[in-house]
Image: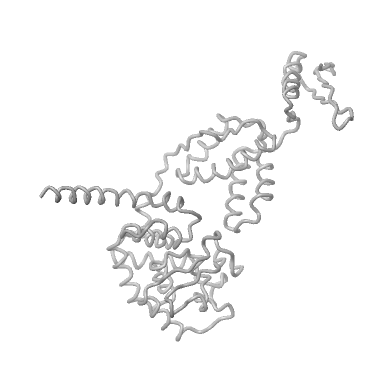
Amino acid sequence: MAKFLQRGKTWQYTISRYTDGKYDPIRKGGFRTKGEAKINADIIEGEMAQGISPILSKDIFADYFFEWVKDMKSTKEEVTYVRYLNTFQTIRELLGRTTLQAMTKRQYQRFLNDYGETRAYETIRKLNTHIRACVRDAVDDGRIRVDFTRGVEFNTKIVSKRPEERHLNYEESVALIAELKDRLEKSLGYYLLLLAVVSGLRFGELCGLKRSDFDFKKNIIKVRQAWDYKKGTGFASLKNPQSKRNVAIDKVTMDIFRDLFSKLPTNIYETLFFNTQSSKGTLTNEATNKLLRNTLKKLEIQPISIHGLRHTHISVLLYKGVSIQFISERAGHKDIETTLKYYSHVLKEMRIEEEEKSVRIMTAMHA
């Protein structure tokens, strides 16, 4: 049974409690009236009666998230870790010293709405993914009772770029490959762009390729490491365990690179796309994107980024009927669900063609 004491102009409650056999009372003051103190004390006593440990201290939401990121995400790839730190900055900027325990679903929805004023749907979704994982752990740890991220809406007026705008179609891909082959002698960057189209490798994986990763007998490239092209710290681990893979490459492209190796000077890292003039130690993402934009402009094709060449490679294989399971493995995706999620638009296009094909087959059977 709680006891109440008036201290000056405010009220305090004291609830008897024993922890490990020792008297460990729960006290809290600052209530304007005895009635307010009693309501709060009743809540705590009700939780204790149910065997629930009462939450007595408060956590600044931003601080709690930061500590969670350090504990749970610091061993991840640096790019991933930095993304979580960016989410921390967003929480700190928009929520200030709001406590985790004070957050409600309505308040969190307003937070997402404010963030979505200048962000596209996918950006809001990724932010929520980070926060939701932290909040669910906070529930498991008993710091809060309810997952306030559950069932929220991602509201925005910013139109996301459609997936089909991020890659080239088959005919555009053929034209680009031909143009890149004509430009190979102008810059090493064109070799990288060509390999990006025919392999679907990530930019970091391309920059991390060494001469020894090319097997000209089997016509495969062994993807074993990436390169930190953002900070220039050298070799980096791959995005996930599935990214360690062998990628089959057509003989025409492999012959082009065999010839390149005979002319290209070696370097201390034995990397293919080493650049002594860059502080990053490799061809930069910015310079390579500029080469791609200029090439596509000459072909009168809507510009895409170099990452769009990875989307192009995967989309072309899907459109040509290569199995989704094989493509997922070739791309180094974490699982097949990742492939299905990002390339559902291509599968929808294929479904329409398959429906038409099925009707033609059934129609022919009536003859």
Whole-percent x, y for residue 107 in the image: 57, 31
Residue at the spot 17% in from the left edge and 50% down from the top edge: 360
Whole-percent x, y for residue 325 in the image: 42, 57
Looking at the image, which is closer to me, 173 or 318? 318
Residue furthest toward the right? 22
Whole-percent x, y for residue 216 in the image: 44, 79
Looking at the image, which is closer to me, 181 or 321? 321
Colour scheme shown: one colour
Residue at the spot 60% in from the left edge and 30% down from the top edge: 104
Looking at the image, is 341 positioned above or below residue 11?
Answer: below
Which of the 4 quarters of the picture holds residue 182?
A: bottom left
Residue furthest toward the left? 367
- Residue 149 vs residue 329: left or right? right
Residue at the spot 83% in from the left edge and 16% down from the top edge: 3
Whole-percent x, y for residue 273 in the image: 49, 74
Please state, as top left, top right, bottom left or bottom right, where the N terminus lies in the image: top right
Residue at the spot 82% in from the left edge and 21% down from the top edge: 15
Looking at the image, is 46 positioned above or below residue 211?
Answer: above
- Residue 206 vs residue 104: left or right? left
- Residue 23 vs residue 93: left or right? right
Looking at the image, is 221 positioned above or below residue 19?
Answer: below
Looking at the image, which is closer to me, 330 or 83? 330
- Figure disc tally: 0
- Residue 220 vs residue 165: left or right? right
